[in-house]
Amino acid sequence: MARFQACFEGNKMLRRKAKKRYLAILGPAGATEVLQKRHAELFGQIKSSQAAIKEIRSEQDTRIIRCSLECADSVLAAIAFCNPPMVALDMSGTIKRLKRRLPAKVNTAAGSI
Amino acid sequence: MDFQYLVVSANIKDSSRVDIITIDNFRTVKDRLKKEAKSGLGIEITIDSVRNRSSPEIASWLQQAKELIKFCKMSRCQFILSSGAELPDRQVSGQSLDAVLRIIGIEPQSYWQELGRWLDSRLALRVTRC
């Protein structure tokens, strides 16, 4: 029984999916590449590959990028230091929830002019 | 109608008359700040001032921010981190600010609470009627 439990726990560990976060960013064209470069320069190539920053969708000035949960803090910090400037509007564990909250966030960002 | 306000300056000589001093490079002004900074003064650094610099300069700036935090604790000044944005697209979101605070070794919740208390104490002194 103990041997069976150990095998089961081992399989559970192997099947665990890496947790991701989806970020909505307000920025110009090429913002994802700028962010990837800045993140790599600030935190190193190893951390950057762990972060796995990837653009999922883009509409006009708004981009949805995906990164790993464990590196979300460093990605958010890198966004603050990017040039041309960009703003992290929202972060969520799923694209669905992010897209649902996005219109309110975009209006808030635009209204703060 | 009463309006509360704070006085901000980039000149360290004004530190006795203003609420917040904005600095760019802590290491170059450290000695002057030691002489002129009074207890309760706010010392502000802005993210916008380093955005267009190279990554090694940003890393140096983050290290200086840590040194500034230690200085503020010793001299009972208030450390302030802000976006420094003058245009909407140069704003920094709350989540990004919290991430930068964690990188320089500050727990965001305690920072915002402390900043709130400091603001309340300073704003109580500065009220004007219009």
Image: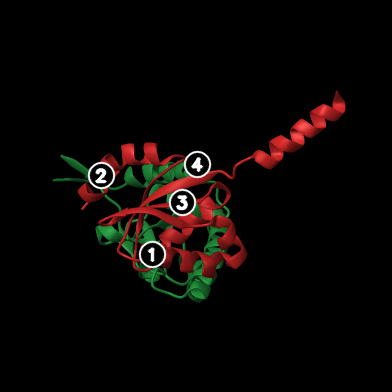
The disc labelled 4 sits on which kind of residue? Gln
Image quadrant assignment for residue A18: top right
Find disc 4 in the rendering and name its residue: B109
Q: Do pointers 1 and 3 mark residues of a single chain?
A: no
- Which circle's residue, 4 or 1, is located before the other in the chain? 1
Q: Is residue B34 above or below residue B20?
A: below
Where disc 1 sits, the SS reads: strand
The answer for how far apart the CA atoms under marks 1 and 3 are is 35 Å
Mark closer to the observer (1, 3): 3
Which mark's residue is nearer the viewer, 2 or 3?
3
Around disc 3, counting alpha carbons within 10 Å, would you say few (fewer than 14), some (14 to 19), or many (20 or more)?
many
Mark 2 or mark 3: whose residue is earlier in sequence: 3
Q: Are marks 3 and 4 in contact (CB under 8 Å)?
A: no
Q: Same chain for labels 2 and 1? Say yes or no.
A: no
Q: Chain of mark 3?
A: A
* Residue at the disc numbered 2: A108
- What is the CA distance from the residue labelled 2 to the residue labelled 1? 27 Å
Question: What residue is shown with label 3?
Answer: A66
Q: Is residue B29 above or below residue A59?
A: below
Crowd class of label 4 (few under 14; some 14 to 19; many from 20; radius 10 Å): few
Amino acid carrying mark 1 in the image: Thr
> Disc 2 marks which amino acid?
Thr
Look at chain B in the picture and name its colour: green
Work out whether residue A63 can be spotted: no
User: Cβ–Cβ below 8 Å for labels 2 and 1?
Assistant: no
Mark 3 and mark 4: Cα distance apart in space: 26 Å
Q: Colour of chain A?
A: red
Quadrant that contains the N terminus of chain A = top right
